[in-house]
Image: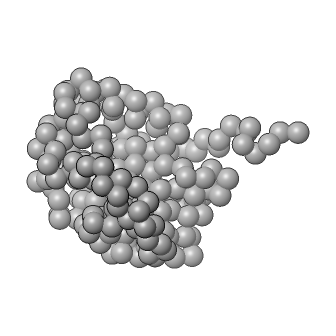
Amino acid sequence: MTQASDMPPTLYELPHELRGVRVCLRPYAVGDGVAVQEAIEESRDQLRPWMAWTDSRRTVQACEAYVRQALARWLTQEDVTVGMWECSSKRYVGGAWLYYTDRRVPAMGIGYWARASAQSQGYVTEAVTLLCKLAFTTLAAQRVSIQCDAANTRSAKIARRLGFVHEATLRNDSRNTMGELTDTLVFAITPNDY
C-alpha cells in the first residue's frame, strides 16, 4: 500500500509572475545574482540580525548560485522562492519565499526581506498579500504562517497588518545570528481568515 508520504507532490500550474500595484514577484532567472548581491551588500547590516545567510552571499558568484538553486526549486515546486521587483523601475527590492511546512495539510510558511532603501515602503506587505493569494487560490493551502524573532518588530507588524493571528510565542525557541537565545513569534492565517 502506498503511503501519502511516498506519493510525489502535486504539481500546480504556477504563474510566470505575480503582479501587484507596485511590486512584481517572479522566479529568479540566470543572471539575477548581480542584482541580489547589490541589494544584500546595501542591506547587510540591517539583514544580519535576522537572516543567517547574509554573510554567505557576499559575492556575485555566491548570489548567482543561490538564484539558480531557487529557480530549480521553483521548477520542481519544492518551494516558491521569488525575487521582488518594483513594477515601474524594474529595480530589485528584495526576496520572498513560500514553502511547505506540511504537504499533507497543506500548510505553508512565508519568509521575506527587503533591501535597506526599499524598507517601510509597502513592498513586503504587497508581496506577502500576493503569496497568500497564490497559496490559498492555486496551491490549496489550509494554513499559511509567518514566524519571526520576537525582536523583529517590523516583521511582526507585517503579519498583524495582514490579519495573521498571533498564535504563539515560543520562548527560548532558537538562537539568533549572534548565538543568543531568542523567542519566536508564530502568526498564521487560514482560508476562513483569508
- Dividing the picture into quadrants, the one containing residue 183 is bottom left
Q: In this view, does 132 lie to the left or right of 103?
A: left
> Is residue 125 visible in the rendered structure shown here?
no
* Residue 16 place in picture, x, y as percent: 41, 42
- Between 86 and 2, the one nearer to me in the picture: 2
Q: How many labels does the image show?
A: 0
Q: Is residue 88 left or right of residue 162?
A: left
Q: Is residue 71 left or right of residue 24?
A: right
* Residue 154 place in picture, x, y as percent: 25, 66
* Residue 75 place in picture, x, y as percent: 49, 33
* Residue 41 place in picture, x, y as percent: 13, 39
On screen, residue 14 above or below 63:
below
- Dividing the picture into quadrants, the one containing residue 110 is bottom left
Classify the position of the N terminus by image quarter.
Answer: top right
Residue shown at 58% from the left, 45% from the top: 12
What coloring was used for the rendering?
Answer: one colour
